[in-house]
Image (spheres, rainbow, N blue to C red):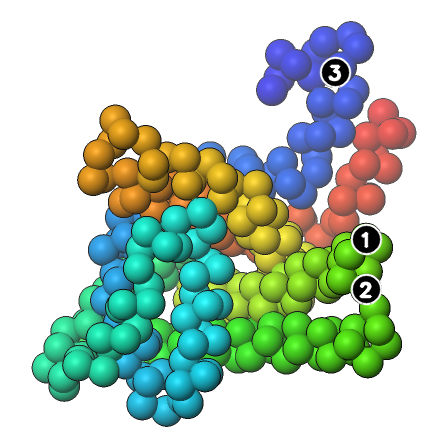
């Protein structure tokens, strides 16, 4: 960026850009080789996805009613835009009740390894030791974090469902039309409910997985950016993913390739949020730094 800063017209704007928190977060990502970290998260997440879904569905089937399980299935399908039908999540949930104790333990082991990889990658963004302490105790902590993540996911989905139900109930009581401005309002309310669910989940992921305590304001901003970014990704990229899955050149690998792309997008968004919380500002706000630039 040094050559761009020295240009006569765009130089001052480029200089101000390099002093923003967003740019400094990108510099943090570039320093820790974030594309490699995203690749590691993508691979382990792809391997652990269906075992974790099976384990979660088995637990849900034992403690939730049939209607609640169906609602959970619908929410899970919404998390993979464009290719949820090809993944056949419904069959996976229906067969989850056949999971035995031994199979459940193996699925749990897969999930713990996945949490370990996420922890190491997020701590790498913070430039901290990736696996500190006793390896056995680390695995126990990772198992606890995995259970907590499941609870946080249920809580966030519950909040989203409650908010959506409340909005729909209010619309019915007030006679709000589902077309035109009323429909746009309901769509916006649904989007906000989904953002709330993602926000709560990211608060847990950005702190408990890497075992760090970011500044509260920085954490809230990072979680909000990630939540909004995830929902925008779902809206924008669903058609692209379904197109990738349907390409004849990929054959039977179309859906797995599309799923890998989706996981990679999420991994990079998560790493950017982690970098946002990890990037230090030397006790100066963005406004202070920009004010200094204006004086030069």
Q: Earlier in the sequence, mark 1 or mark 3?
A: 3
Q: Nearer the viewer, mark 1 or mark 3?
A: 1
Q: Quadrant of the N terminus?
A: top right
Q: CA distance from mark 1 to mark 3?
A: 45 Å
Q: CA distance from mark 2 to mark 3?
A: 51 Å
Residue appearing at x 48%, y 67% in the figure: 75
The residue labelled by disc 1 is 180
- Neighbours of disc 3 within 10 Å: few (<14), some (14-19), many (20+): some
Q: Quick one: SS at disc 3?
A: helix
- Neighbours of disc 2 within 10 Å: few (<14), some (14-19), many (20+): some
66, above or below 113, in the image:
below
Quarter assignment of residue 91: bottom left
Q: Earlier in the sequence, mark 2 or mark 3?
A: 3
Q: CA distance from mark 1 to mark 2?
A: 7 Å
**Residue 185, position as x, y percentages in the image:** 79, 60
Q: Is mark 1 in CB contact (under 8 Å) with mark 2?
A: yes
Foreground residue among 292 and 58: 58
Label for residue 177?
A: 2
The residue labelled by disc 3 is 11
């Amino acid at each position: 960026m040094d050559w761009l800063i020295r240009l006569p017209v765009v130089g001052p704007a480029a200089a101000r850009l390099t002093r923003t928190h967003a740019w400094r977060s990108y510099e943090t990502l570039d320093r820790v080789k974030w594309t490699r970290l995203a690749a590691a998260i993508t691979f382990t997440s792809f391997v652990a996805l269906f075992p974790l879904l099976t384990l979660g569905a088995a637990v849900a089937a034992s403690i939730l009613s049939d209607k609640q399980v169906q609602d959970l299935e619908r929410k899970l399908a919404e998390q993979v835009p464009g290719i949820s039908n090809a993944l056949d999540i419904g069959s996976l949930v229906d067969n989850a009740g056949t999971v035995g104790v031994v199979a459940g333990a193996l699925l749990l082991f897969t999930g713990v390894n996945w949490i370990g990889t996420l922890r190491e990658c997020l701590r790498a963004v913070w430039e901290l030791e990736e696996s500190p302490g006793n390896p056995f105790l680390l695995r126990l902590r990772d198992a606890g974090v995995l259970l907590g993540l499941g609870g946080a996911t249920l809580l966030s989905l519950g909040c989203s469902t409650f908010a959506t139900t409340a909005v729909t109930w209010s619309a019915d009581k007030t006679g709000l039309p589902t077309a035109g401005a009323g429909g746009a309002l309901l769509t916006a309310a649904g989007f906000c409910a989904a953002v709330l669910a993602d926000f709560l989940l990211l608060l847990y992921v950005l702190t408990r997985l890497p075992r760090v305590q970011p500044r509260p304001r920085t954490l809230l901003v990072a979680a909000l950016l990630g939540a909004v970014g995830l929902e925008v990704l779902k809206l924008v990229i669903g058609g692209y993913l379904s197109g990738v899955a349907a390409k004849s050149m990929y054959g039977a690998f179309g859906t797995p390739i599309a799923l890998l792309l989706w996981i990679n997008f999420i991994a990079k968004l998560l790493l950017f949020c982690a970098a946002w919380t990890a990037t230090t500002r030397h006790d100066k706000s963005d406004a202070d730094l920009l004010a200094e630039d204006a004086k030069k």
